[in-house]
Image (spheres, rainbow, N blue to C red):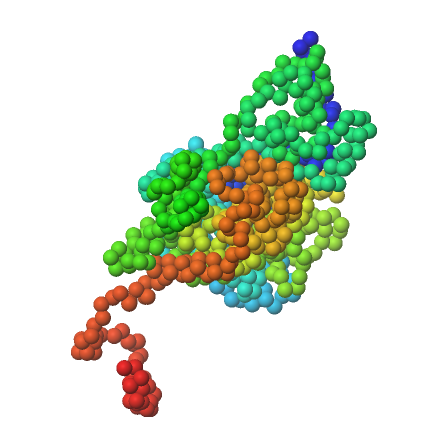
Amino acid sequence: SDGAGDREARHLRISLPPQGSVDCPNVEFEYRDADGYAAELSELYSYTEEPEFTINRKCFEEDFQTQVQGKRWPELDLAQQKAYVMRLLDGLEVVNRNKRLKAARAVLYLAQGVFGECDMEAEVLHWSRHNNFLLYQMGTFSAFLELLNMEIENSQACSSALRKPAISLADSTELRVLLSVMYLLVENFRVEAEADPPEWKSSRETFRTELSFPVHSEEPFALLLFTMVAKFCSGHAPHFPMKKVLLLLWKVLLFTLGGFEALQAMKTKKREELGLPPLPEDSIQVMRRMRAASPPTYTIELLDQQSSKRGHRSRRVRPLVKQDSLDIYNERDPFKNDEAGVDEEENDDVDSGIEGELDLIERDAIIQAGPAQRPPIERVSFPKGLPWAPKVRQKDIEHFLEASRNKFIGFTLGQDTDTLVGLPRPIHESVKTLKQHKYVSISDVQIKNEEELEKCPMSLGEEEVQETPCEMLYRAMLYNLPQYMIALLKILLAAAPTSKAKTDSINILADVLPEEMPITVLQSMKLGVDVNRHKEIIVKSISASLLLLLKHFKLNHIYQFEYVSQHLVFANCIPLILKFFNQNIMSYITAKNSISVLDYPHCTVHELPELTAESLEAGDNNQFCWRNLFSCINLLRLLNKLTKWKHSRTMMLVVFKSAPILKRALKAKQAMMQLYVLKLLKIQTKYLGRQWRKSNMKTMSAIYQKVRHRMNDDWAYGNDIDARPWDFQAEECTLRANIEAFNSRRYDKSQDSEFAPVDNCLQSVLGQRLELPEDFHYSYELWLEREVFSQPIRWEELLHYQ
């Protein structure tokens, strides 16, 4: 009988319709540094580039047959493979441009996994990995870096591209081949596998060091890619294949600086070094355990739901969710007795926006099965309490004590948080609780150290700066950093799905449009999919790169993070991200802009079927598009980073009416995405007014359950001191002054001369040897005549300086 009950319950679960149009399925998405290995390799190539796989193979086979007769590449031993690669690299140094390109294509074919010798996709990926490690050990990266520098400086290619009315794939052939080889090298080295031999592991560390601390040039490799981005946006090099450049830039940053888990480990280590207590929890793990909430119901949808239910249920609809149904994390059994079952069923009528205990469909089905046929229910356990440990800042304790002293004593003691004389017992308990949850961040320590260095530059002496990859990159980027940020945001704007095509916007499609435009409907559909996919990949790489930069700079030094953040804000990053989200986010997340049969490595080992309009429209079978969901989360995290603890920027969110835009994004049932949306809503609730809070109680409850609590943060009521009118411009100006002082002290060594001893002796000053140019003595008399004899001596001006 139990088996029959099980079967009936299962049948009921499947057959029941969803509860309302907004209750979309949970999105099973795991956020990580990048997508799967094969997916990341396939995104390097546009579908328009597909014929080039055959060209690469042809270039390799023509050369290989002349060098090694009667053998295939997998049949060669390691020494023979190395000897052949050396001959190929010699071909890269010839003067003839076409011969160089053929040799580069042959190297690219090796890096792509000699797919002509393989029958399965796994074989292609295996040989790609093997060949890339071999290519690096033979010095391929250095050779291709020289060629890349040559192509960047190739003024002839730039001028011919500028003269053309329409730029296509053909204008960037050499650059695309070079960047593809470099990307394959970086991506294969970045992805670690347990089966990697020891020599591969040592090569990986050598390569990481080579990219981070360049030996031959004065700048990290990432800076060269930033320069390419800036040059492209300035209009001087419209033929640069931007998608490949941005993908390579992202992977270089990910490989040299480290991903999110490496970042968490670095943060833990740095806290130990500074003598700070360990982090209360691992944020990555907490978010992975978090469950998505049902999105808030919109008025129209709620009316539709109620009218449809009135037809077959006559009982009263409750206007408000019961309080106990809001306690997601309280451990309780929803099926205590039959009466409780009725209550739960009644509660289903209201789309409780933050109810996550059981899936509504499953629960309704089990209840309707009736008490006689109910299968034995396993107790559902939830984590007790809230997901995050509360945090309190030193500033919060000071504000609390200041208010308490003013109320009970009538005067304050400044920043003293230890003296509690004259305050009642409950205040003592409150201060004790606040101090138990006090959190000192690495940024707080860095700001305090910076203040001390500014006050006492002589007595504290030179600051010891660790030469980390992050520090090297910031120093290299510093003077052109505003241009780099503006360039990235310009491309992001051009790639956003909500952007309208304008005549003055930059053309980011140079490396996807074919030489001959499509003539059939099918070709146009294929190109349409390719263009949309191209834009999505660009958004993905820019959003991930910016987030990585901000997170690493924040850990390295808070003012490096603030410098980048401020330039992003000045370049209108906040309205740009809001504009991106002002679309149907569910459509963007579930977009099917891919043709799986044309994806690498599938297209290299299978015969391509004839494409039809139906197969193009079908796309893949995935529930959602990984890269688009990844991009959305990155952009939300970026927005959080820019606005956190910044009242002026929070007001920008209010002014740009971000609340309804963000609320629509809650429709995506993915816990991490919802968390960052709720964080953004939380920081502005105090400015949105009582009426907004009253009509959005489900969203307010979701914020309470999912976002970290700040103990005396009055976010839900708007009585906080920070909700009062604020001189926002002064806040940004003070921050800017602190950033400039930091950059000047640490990086402008020439300005330290005011602290250097001054030589006042005339003879020793005149006796100093000056470095003069070699040809100076030829024009010495001319210089004397022009600069000394012909200039009248104005003795009276000396009186003004005394």
Q: Is residue 526 above or below residue 382?
A: below
- The quadrant holding residue 200 is top left
Q: Can residue 185 be spotted in the picture?
A: no
As drawn, is 223 to the left or to the right of 172? left
User: Residue placed farthest to the right in the image?
Assistant: 311
Q: Quadrant of the C terminus?
A: bottom left
User: Which residue is rendered at x = 48% and y = 47% of the image?
Assistant: 548
Q: Residue at x 48, y 54 (%)?
A: 565
Q: Is residue 238 left or right of residue 306?
A: left
Number of disc labels: 0
- Relative to 702, 204 lies left or right: left
**Residue 189 location (% of width, % of height):** 44, 42
Q: Position of residue 226 (x, y in %)?
A: 48, 57
Quadrant of the snapshot with the N terminus: top right
Closer to the camera in the image, 501 or 276: 276
Residue 449 in view = yes
Picture coordinates of residue 531, whole percent (x, y): 65, 51
